[in-house]
Amino acid sequence: MSTPPTNTPAALSIEAVRKVAKLARLSPTPEKAQRYQGQLSSILTYIDRLRSLDLKGVEPMASPLDATSNLGADRPGPTLPTSVLMDMAPQKHEPFIRVPKVLGDGGGA
């Protein structure tokens, strides 16, 4: 476990908040700018805490799901019998089935 940072970043000035808001094309009211000042200062303090963590020996991940994925190998499993598939099809022209178009202008989900 790492120790918390010894130097906490200074609170973000209201001028800095207004500058960030302008860059984001926002026009916050003075009340909102004051609220954003506290929120942004908290975020910067948290980022500073993250920077202080000792990550030696920690493998980088391509995705947070890398650590939580319990999926097995991708192997084909059992398939439906053709007769069951044909019964489920909206339209059939044996040995083919016809399904609604889902791409382009055909509607779909």
Image (spheres, rainbow, N blue to C red):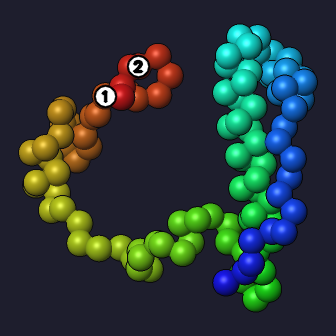
Q: Where is mark 2, residue-wise?
A: 106
Quarter of the figure with the N terminus: bottom right
Badge 1: how crowded within 10 Å, few (<14), some, or many (20+)? Answer: few
Image side of residue 55 versus residue 77, left or right: right
- Name the residue: 70% across, 46% down: 42
Q: Nearer the viewer, residue 11 or 83?
A: 11
Quarter of the figure with the C terminus: top left
**Are the two marked residues, 2 and 1, in contact with CB atoms closer than 8 angstroms?**
yes
Q: Quadrant of residue 27?
A: top right
Q: Where is mark 1, residue-wise?
A: 100
Q: Is residue 86 above or below residue 93?
A: below
Q: CA distance from mark 2 to mark 1?
A: 8 Å
- Name the residue: 26% across, 43% down: 96
Residue 106, x across and y down, in percent: 41, 19
Residue 65, x across and y down, in percent: 53, 66
Image side of residue 85 versus residue 17, left or right: left
Badge 2: how crowded within 10 Å, few (<14), some, or many (20+)? Answer: few
Label 2: which secondary element: loop
Q: Residue furthest bottom?
A: 57
Amino acid type assigned to the residue bearing label 2 in the image: Gly
Q: Is residue 69 above or below residue 21?
A: below
Residue 59, x across and y down, in percent: 71, 81
